[in-house]
Amino acid sequence: MLRRFIPSALLFALMAVLTLPVLTVMLSWLELDADSLPILTQMLQTVLPEYAFTSLLLCLSVALGVAVVGMATASVVTLFDFPGRRFFSWALLLPLAMPAYVVAYAYTDFLQYAGPLQTWMRGSFGLQGRLLPEVRSLGGAVLVFTVSLYPYVYLLARTALSERAVHLMEAARLLGAPLSRRIREVALPLARPAVAAGVALALMETLADFGVSSYFGIQTFTSGIYKAWLAMDNRLAAAQLASVLLLVVAVLLKIEHHAQKRMRFSTSRGGRAGAADAAPTPLHGLTAGAAVLVCALPVLLGFVLPVLFMLRPLFAGWGELPWTQFVRWSLNSVGLAGLSAALATGIAIGLAFALRRRPDWPTRAAVQLAGLGYAVPGAVIVVGLLLPVGWLQAAAPQTAAGYWITGTVLGIVWAYLVRFTAVALQSVQSGYTRIPASFDDSARMLGSTGPALLLKVHWPLLQRSVGTAALLVFVDVMKELPATLVLRPFNSDTLAVVTYQLARDERLGEAALPALALVLVGLLPVLLLGRTWRRN
């Protein structure tokens, strides 16, 4: 009895740690003090409608953009054969390596009034004034998010279409349906759940963003949370605003889960029978050129041009780059990312193994709660961690809880685990799906139970999935900005924080070095995924 109780107690203690920030934010409405209520009332009468309208308009525009770009590129690559098709099938993933705030800095540096493009145009053509629309605007943010986040839709739509669309398109062609009708009545319905899931993921990233909206001066709901907290010095009001954002994200997460279930249903029936006998429709001439253009533009706008724009100031100021500080920033980033990746992966292995051994409803519920963290915006996690610290310090002024959360790596690593354990858990669970249950039964008959089962049977088969999980968490932590900006210990800036601070101070030449370092790190999982696709 005791042997069963201890693992269960540890499991639920771990769940309490991972869900505490979210629960704190939701419970903040139980405490309406004399300070927070007037602030909320004042914000509701003045700025909150603007925040809500701007966030809604931004989300609708980004949803339309990523749906069109992601679906168009996935359809072209999957259903048609044209020059460069194999290259674009993985190159379209490259914008995943670019943090959205880095794309924003790159375009601002090149296209702003004092940037090289407008300066050259005024000097070459004798023109005066502003020659291009203002980059730091809602439209600029929509462009940045669209070219940065469309791979979410592309990934899922391409997978859905490759499962059945090619041979169903071939069957429709043999029945006499023209190409336009085959796309409209076969391909699009098959990809609709995937597009919905990809759009939901992109919108969660958009709502969680702080770097782009802050740099562009866009008043989104996330900006309202930080303003209530930092400018008005009221954590409770910030938590109550964060709870509203959390409810919106929960709705998006529900849509994404529902769409994922529809994807599994639509792709599981019928399998891949006949897919080997079908082939993508070959394109020639102008149609082939149009297909190349459809695939090249997103890669150009989302990866190639931002990298080139950042390389220009990097080489221009090469002799003045802060290399010594860059090494320190890199070591801080790598240290935090490595520690968080190791802990998140270890927790994911423990949770997945517990679910494998005892798939009862308490264990499933605990694992599902741990898997929700990735959908929680960084701003919500920060508020959810610091609010109980404030409560504790008010009740016991001599406590050192504030120091341990904000003065050491404990707070920032805690925030990373809340946010990114779900990433590791998804990869480890994917590895477990490839291990038959009969292996466990055979191992138990031979005397391997408990930790021995994990170490001797599961671990050798999970090493690739565990490595992938650690890599994904490592890269996500390296790029994470909102939580790091607030919770990092004193004098321990990371590459993401320094990139944001230098760009905010208009020192884009110095910001290019840490920004490009983040891009290089982000390329690792993209190249790994592209390699996997090329093998298949």
Image: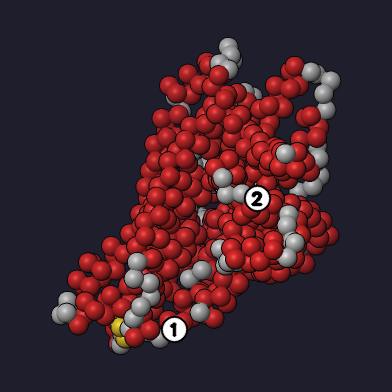
Q: How is the image coloured?
A: secondary structure
- What residue is shown at x 34% (from left), y 86% (from top)? 277
Q: Is residue 309 visible?
A: no
Q: Is residue 249 left or right of residue 76?
A: right
**Residue 409: image location, x then y, percent:** 78, 43
Q: Is label 2 or label 1 in front? A: 2
Q: Which residue is most to the top?
A: 34
Q: Which residue is mark 2?
A: 354
Against 16, residue 43 (above or below) is above
Q: Seen in the image, is 111 located left or right of residue 510?
A: left
Q: Residue at x 76, y 21 (%)?
A: 393
Indicate the quadrant where residue 517 lies. Answer: bottom right
Up-down relation of residue 317 to residue 424 (above or below): below
Residue 459 locus on image (x, y percent): 71, 65
- The amino acid beneath tag 2 is Ala
What residue is shown with label 1? 84
Secondary structure beneath label 1 = loop
Q: Is residue 299 visible?
A: yes
Which residue is at 61% across, 29% downward?
24
Residue type, numbered disc 1: Gly
- Tell me the tag on residue 173: none
Image coordinates for residue 311, horizontal then vertical, percent: 63, 68
Q: How far apart are the two marked residues, 2 and 1, measured between alpha carbons?
A: 46 Å
Mark 1 crowd level (few <14, some 14–19, many ≥20, 10 Å Cα): some
Identify the mark nearer the N-term, 2 or 1.
1
